[in-house]
């Protein structure tokens, strides 16, 4: 009897499994599947010339495998991450368990015409990100996704309401806090059917809750933290008419520690405003930002670049040239008043469509706002960049770019008088021999001077003058070979780098070897410190 029952159960189970697999196979065949892999690996070597000491096992590897599937209104996905261990200089590798293989993110989503329900890891932003932004930046080793539930409702684009609740990711684990919030956007342009006018109003609220009873080196009550709740609010305006657009946002938060280095909790506030105008071949933009203790951590018990709930953008030009990006601007979350202006003008030849010139001028600056930020209570400049460049397309085969930048910054965010001023010159030439072969060369020079320091005082970061060059040769569409060199006159140090890349379809492999200078790696104003290292780097990316 038992044998008959067991056989019957086995038969039914096999039949059900076949039916389930058949249905699943049909389900999968009708949908769309996509995947991508990125693996960045470095073999480190000791290099006494630049003070680079290889980590203990001389190897680092960051790998990401992302898979997504969608069918109709349903979608799902996951990301598997491995750090074996994390690349040198990444804060991921400074965690208790630097070697990690884990499910980094996952989600299921249902999107209808007017609403969306999302369960899993949430990537989103309220307004300009002043009160909440969750995102991933692999170059920084940064991922602060919110693991929880998210819902959004949209009524004819008249208004959009979003809500979320979950726990934030902190490196390869989760913070001990819980975050919830809501965002409402009302579009008056869609409500009143204005054809040429955009007018949106947006309001956001975010709450972070974290118990204050966990073991800690800090006594939070003595630092002014009396509640486990932190409240953040913001209101934003978005206006557009013809070639004119205007964005403005005000944000505030309740009493909190804006960074783990701050001894006292205080309230925070931020103002962000941006204006853009474009007409024919001319465009101009201006941005203003004031931040006062508005940095918000995911957890009072965490630290580092990844321990952040919101996003405060840097108002400075983002360069891709070696010397122009030696000392990028870092936002001072304790207090900073900053502004930036951009001008673009395009001039085209009447006789040839392949001849045109793009002229660009940019200015950015940042200042302290509080008496406590300087040794004598005065306001001081912490950053300034005045730059201009001309991109000249002389013919289809020849393009040149000339850049000048004067950067001045304070190594200690203006606490004592004294800055480092750099004058940077860049010449960039690109020439296409035909549709297959192309050449590009760069020549850069930087001369620097320490200003305002007392006699005998030299800032630690002052390194003197630099020269740099880059040569690149490509064979389309697969091969690219390059070599670069940076030389510092002050320390008599060379930073060489050479590599080759191969691409076919959606697969790319790059192999390089060289020296990397110690300094900050930044993305949009968010920075991590990278120590000097020398090594062999192998990078693979593929989409399938």
Image: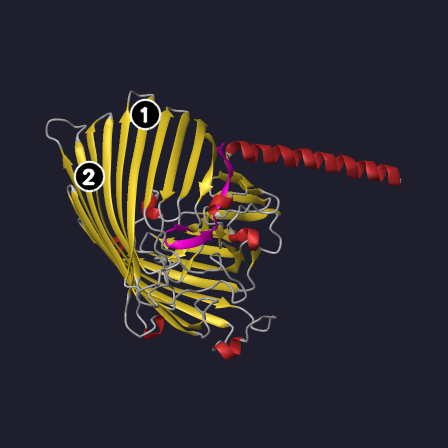
Residue 358: numbered disc: 2
Give the mark nearest the N terminus, 2 or 1: 2
Residue 63, by quadrant, is: top right
Q: x and y percent of residue 472 in the render?
A: 36, 30
Write the residue at 38% across / 69% down. 293
The span picked out in magenta is: 520-544
Main secondary structure along the magenta-highlighted residues = strand
Say which element carries label 2: strand
Query: Mark 2 and mark 1: span between their CA atoms?
Result: 21 Å
Mark 2 residue crowding within 10 angstroms, few (<14) / some (14–19) / many (20+): some
Q: Position of residue 165 (x, y in %)?
A: 50, 61
Rendering coords of residue 200 (x, y %):
28, 58
Residue 137 in sight: yes
- Which secondary structure lies at badge 1? strand
Q: Residues within 10 Å of mark 1 (few under 14, many from 20)?
A: some
* Front position in the image: 494 or 26: 494
Residue that mark 1 sits on? 438
The answer to if 526 sits in the magenta stretch is yes
- Asked if the residue under mark 1 is in contact with the one under mark 2, i.e. CB atoms within 8 Å, the reply is no
């Amino acid at each position: 009897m038992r044998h008959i029952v067991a056989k019957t159960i086995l038969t039914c189970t096999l039949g059900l499994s076949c039916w389930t697999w058949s249905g699943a196979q049909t389900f999968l065949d009708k949908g769309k599947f996509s995947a991508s892999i990125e693996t960045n690996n470095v073999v480190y070597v000791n290099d006494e010339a630049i003070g680079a000491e290889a980590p203990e096992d001389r190897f680092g590897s960051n790998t990401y495998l992302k898979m997504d599937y969608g069918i109709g209104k349903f979608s799902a996905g996951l990301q598997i991450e491995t750090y074996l261990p994390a690349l040198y200089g990444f804060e991921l590798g400074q965690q208790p368990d630097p070697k990690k293989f884990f499910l980094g993110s996952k989600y299921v989503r249902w999107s209808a015409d007017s609403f969306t329900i999302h369960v899993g890891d949430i990537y989103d932003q309220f307004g300009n990100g002043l009160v909440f932004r969750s995102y991933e930046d692999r170059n920084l080793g940064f991922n602060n996704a919110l693991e929880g539930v998210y819902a959004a409702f949209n009524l004819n684009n008249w208004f959009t309401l979003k809500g979320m609740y979950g726990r934030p990711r902190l490196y390869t684990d989760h913070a001990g806090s819980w975050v919830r919030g809501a965002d409402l956007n009302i579009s008056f342009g869609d409500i009143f059917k204005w054809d040429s006018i955009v007018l949106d109003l947006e309001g956001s609220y975010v709450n972070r809750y974290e118990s204050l009873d966990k073991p800690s080196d800090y006594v939070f009550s003595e630092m002014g933290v009396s509640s486990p709740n932190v409240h953040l609010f913001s209101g934003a305006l978005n206006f557009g008419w013809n070639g004119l657009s205007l964005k403005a946002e005000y944000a505030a938060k309740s009493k909190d520690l804006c960074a783990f280095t701050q001894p006292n909790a205080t309230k925070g506030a931020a103002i962000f405003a941006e204006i853009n105008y474009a007409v024919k071949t001319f465009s101009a933009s201006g941005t203003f930002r004031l931040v006062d203790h508005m940095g918000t951590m995911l957890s009072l018990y965490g630290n580092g670049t990844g321990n952040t709930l919101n996003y405060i953008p840097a108002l400075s030009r983002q360069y891709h040239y070696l010397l122009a990006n030696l000392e990028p601007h870092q936002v001072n979350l304790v207090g900073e008043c900053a502004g930036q202006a951009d001008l673009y003008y395009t001039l085209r030849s009447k006789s040839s469509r392949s001849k045109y010139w793009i002229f660009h001028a940019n200015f950015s600056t940042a200042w302290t706002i509080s008496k406590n930020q300087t040794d004598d209570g005065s306001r001081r400049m912490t950053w300034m960049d005045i730059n201009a460049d001309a991109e000249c397309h002389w013919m289809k085969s020849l393009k040149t770019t000339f850049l000048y930048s004067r950067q001045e910054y304070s190594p200690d965010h203006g606490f004592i008088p004294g800055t480092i001023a750099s004058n940077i010159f860049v010449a960039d030439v690109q020439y296409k021999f035909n549709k297959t072969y192309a050449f590009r060369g760069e020549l850069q020079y930087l001369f620097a001077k320490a200003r305002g320091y007392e006699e005998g005082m030299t800032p630690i970061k002052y390194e003197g003058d630099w020269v740099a060059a880059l040569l690149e040769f490509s064979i389309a569409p697969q091969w690219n070979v390059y070599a670069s060199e940076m030389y510092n006159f002050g320390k008599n140090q060379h930073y060489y780098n050479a590599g080759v890349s191969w691409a076919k379809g959606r697969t790319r492999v790059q192999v390089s070897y060289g020296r990397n200078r110690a300094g900050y790696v930044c993305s949009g104003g968010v920075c991590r410190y990278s120590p000097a290292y020398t090594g062999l780097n192998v990078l693979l990316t593929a989409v399938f």
